[in-house]
Amino acid sequence: MKVPIDITINGRSYQRDVEPRQLLVHFIRDLGGLTGTKVGCDTSQCGSCTVLLDGVAVKSCTCLAVQADGASMTTIEGLADQGTLHPLQEAFWEKHGLQCGFCTPGMILASHELLRHNPDPSDADIRHGLEGNLCRCTGYQNIVRAVRHAADALAEK
Amino acid sequence: MYPADFAYYRASSVQDAGRLLSEHPGAKLLAGGHSLIPLLKLRLAVPPALIDVGRIADLSGISVASDRLRIGALTPHAEVAASSEVATHAAALADAAGQIGDPAVRNRGTVGGNIAHADPASDLPAVLCALDASIGIVGAGGDRTVSAGEFFLGMMTTALGEDEIVTHVEIHSGQEHGSAYAKFPHPASRFAVIGVAAVVTADGDTCRSAAVALGGLLPAPVRASHVEQAIGGQPLNEASITEAAARAGDDLGDEILGDVFASADYRQAMAPVYVARALTAAAARAR
């Protein structure tokens, strides 16, 4: 059984016939060719597959592509505005909020979700808000600084 | 990890979902998928078909009418956690919903999916038992309501029939009480190693009555009747709460769960600590 679906990713429509069992993360990576979204733990614990589904952060390893039929998604590739980095991307660069970079796409999109609810988070708010995203390099210190930096930059806009 | 192959049907209404369930024996309902999809990926569940109820609009939302707080089955945990109505009428439920998984999980996971799945380490079952919630069900045999205490039968086992669908939960909203949820989360999965919900009604600083439910420890949540009796009529201070909480062992029976992270003995030893925390927090809200 294949199901026709239409998912908009970063403003572009992807119409495909998919097996119902296809996970959203594989749709994004294999059919969409957008490999910024990572498969990490594959059990909805590490957050490296985090994307925005109709503006809301979700773990795409625990969604079926058919569930996202008709939705509009943003992946890390869609966050920059015509070549200008999003303030979160700029902040992770500026504050060295990454080392290997594997968790970074998910970390940035989870940070986007955090700032959507709380534009002026304390360090504790940031640590709590990112509890579903694991980083094995940084020890989180610079990630917290990066999110704080991005919050300041967004407030100045 | 790929799930095994299955057929997929999208239900347009509760009635449509019921029809699809009767047409496809063994099919499972799909809402947010945050309990079901992990089981499919591990192939612990291999249903021939999924029936997606995730777009049935009238299954979602929170409302208060005639002394009942009603939460639609498709309401995501994030919405429950952020709801002022839930905070007012069922604070323990808001506490618990805000501690499920992480923010992205709470955006997708639903109340109905959570309770129909009935994981023993889930947060909501114990809370609904303590709040004496009722669970609305629609099936081929008609509509019915089951109390939370009668809904959760055992490990991943509920009173829900093969052809039935959870539509909502309801909680009495007219009571003056304080409620709270105290949780010992597993550090990786954030499931409840121990989760205790307490509901306290108070006359000043005296406990008029209390409802306490224990989750995470047993295959299904239980009301801690020994604790409830011990705190009833007593002053809501540290000494009497600690003394009542110590009775939790009498309510646990001999089916206490244990795993590599937390043995049954350890959970049993820790249970009174979380009972006391839940009672203390509920008492503070009851005054």
Image (cartoon, rainbow, N blue to C red):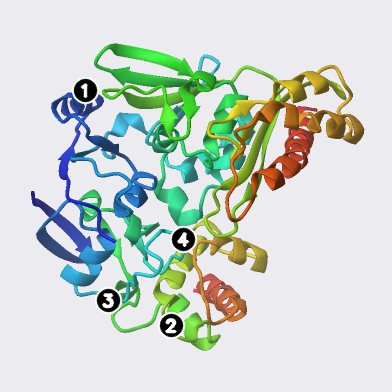
The amino acid at mark 3 is Thr
Q: Earlier in the sequence, mark 4 or mark 3?
A: 3
| Residue with the most extreme right position | B239
Q: CA–CA distance between discs 1 and 4?
A: 35 Å
Could you classify mark 1 by the number of other residues whose Cα lies within 10 Å: few (under 14), some (14-19), or many (20 or more)? some
Q: Read off the residue under disc 2.
A: A101
Q: Chain of mark 1?
A: B
Which secondary structure lies at badge 1? helix
Q: Which residue matches tag 4?
A: A45
Mark 3 vs mark 2, CA separation in Å: 13 Å
Residue found 50% across the figure and 72% down from its top: A154
Task: Specify whether A141 is left or right of A156.
Answer: right
Instruction: Say if residue A31 shows up in the picture.
Output: yes
Question: Are the residues flagged by discs 1 and 2 from a single subunit?
Answer: no
Q: Is B263 situated above or below A141?
A: above
Please report, as a chain letter, where disc 4 is located.
Answer: A
Q: Disc 1 and disc 3: Cα gap in Å? A: 40 Å
Query: SS class of the residue under badge 3?
Result: loop
Secondary structure under badge 2? loop
- Of residue B223 and residue B206, the one placed in the foreground of this image is B223
User: In the image, is residue A106 above or below residue B26?
Assistant: below
State the SS at label 4.
Answer: loop
Please give the residue where the numbered disc 1 appears in the rendered image. B15
- Residue at coordinates 58% horizontally, 35% vertically from top-left? B218
Q: Which mark is residue B268?
A: none
